[in-house]
Amino acid sequence: MANYKFILSGGGTGGHIYPAIAIANELKAQFPDAEFLFVGAKDKMEMQKVPQAGYEIKGLWIAGLQRKLTLQNLMFPLKLATSLLESRRIIKQFKPNVVIGTGGFASGPLLQAAGGAGIPTVIQEQNSFPGITNKLLSKKANAICVAYQNLERFFPKEKIVLTGNPVRQDLIDIDSKREEAIAFYGLDPNKKTLLVLGGSLGARRVNQLIEKELENMLSQDVQVIWQCGKLYFEEYKKHNQQHVRVVDFIERMDFVYAAADVIISRAGASSVSELCIVGKPVIFIPSPNVAEDHQTKNAQAIVDAKGAILLKESELDSQFSIVFEALLKDEGKQKQLSVNIKKLAMPNAVKVIVDQIRKLL
């Protein structure tokens, strides 16, 4: 078998890094002799996460454009030019068979350089509303693997393949882990469990909401696993008590999903894909502070399929307690949301993506 070489680039957030690692792991399973190199942005979290997953990574001097005039923006043309030169050098040295981009700043110059050198490229777009980098790269890409329908308005139709987003394989069968998960968190098996997910760094507005509503929730015989994020743990750990588990970060996502009856979550693309597979009733509170408001669009795609509830941050004070109490009391509604969100799950995404990569070898 030929000794294939793959370069993967994705970073800035876990939502870009995790899919890239999942794709690399599947390629490695199918091509045990293959060589891998990751390319990320210097100072971003991929520089730690990728080596932890066992892969080599090189960093580019690149950052995104800010929305206002800053020194960063004035530096952008220089950073881009430097990163393009460095990307060309990396590609020339490593000689990859295929280059795969999962989004983030570094994937722009890298895939641009690969396309210029005539090397096949694959884009994996997690969101229902693509970022500017992938829109630009799509013109030259050989295949564009997407997680949502109706992206023809952004990408060349003939290149689009509906694959779904790569997710952790240990989430496929969580029902069998419920007892173990309840014991792991020291929870009461007879109470309903609310799981609150704010993303790896945390979500200020979600944390403020849970703090305000906590007594009310506990009075309704609910216990809470509250992932407040690393940035906020010191502030909120004081709420740890008999029926409340406050954590900064979750290692065993399969356990928290198994224990949960109802979930409150941000609507990042990876989270949404995981929640489709998990199939529990969800209230999405999208972050309004992300590029092109794509979290709201991700959540809306699920709501349109009657698979979740969406509350905007601006509606929380007036609507949250009404919506939450109504959902908690309505077992039929919970079941309907579970069934509908699960219909949108694509558990084989990573295998379908690797099939697309195989075609280019």
Image (cartoon, helix red, strand yellow):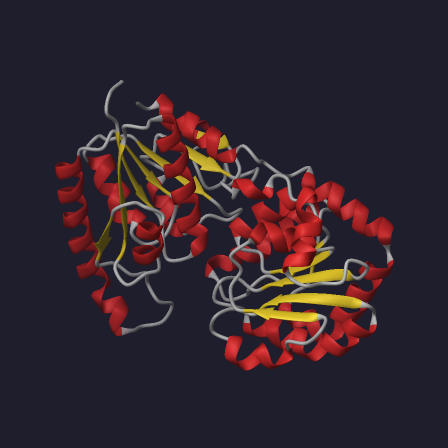
Tell me which corner region of the image, top left, top right, bottom left or bottom right, holds residue 140. Answer: top left
Q: Which quadrant of the figure has residue 316?
A: bottom right
In the image: residue 273, left or right of residue 359:
right
Q: Nearer the viewer, residue 234 or 165?
A: 234
Q: Nearer the viewer, residue 6 or 302?
A: 6
Q: Nearer the viewer, residue 5 or 170?
A: 170
Instruction: Write the residue at 32% across / 57% down.
Output: 48
Q: Is residue 137 above or below residue 355?
A: below
- Count of numbered labels shown in the rendering: 0
Quadrant for residue 158, please give it: top left
Measured from the top left, where is residue 188 in percent x and y? Answer: 76, 62
- In-image side of 181 versus 14 (left or right): right
> What residue sits 69% from the left and 45% below the top?
279
* Point 63% across, 56% down: residue: 256
Quadrant the C terminus occupies = top left
Would residue 283 be seen by someone viewing this image from the given angle?
A: no
Asked if residue 145 lies left or right of residue 96, the reply is right
**In the rendered view of the protein, which quadrant contains the N terminus?**
top left
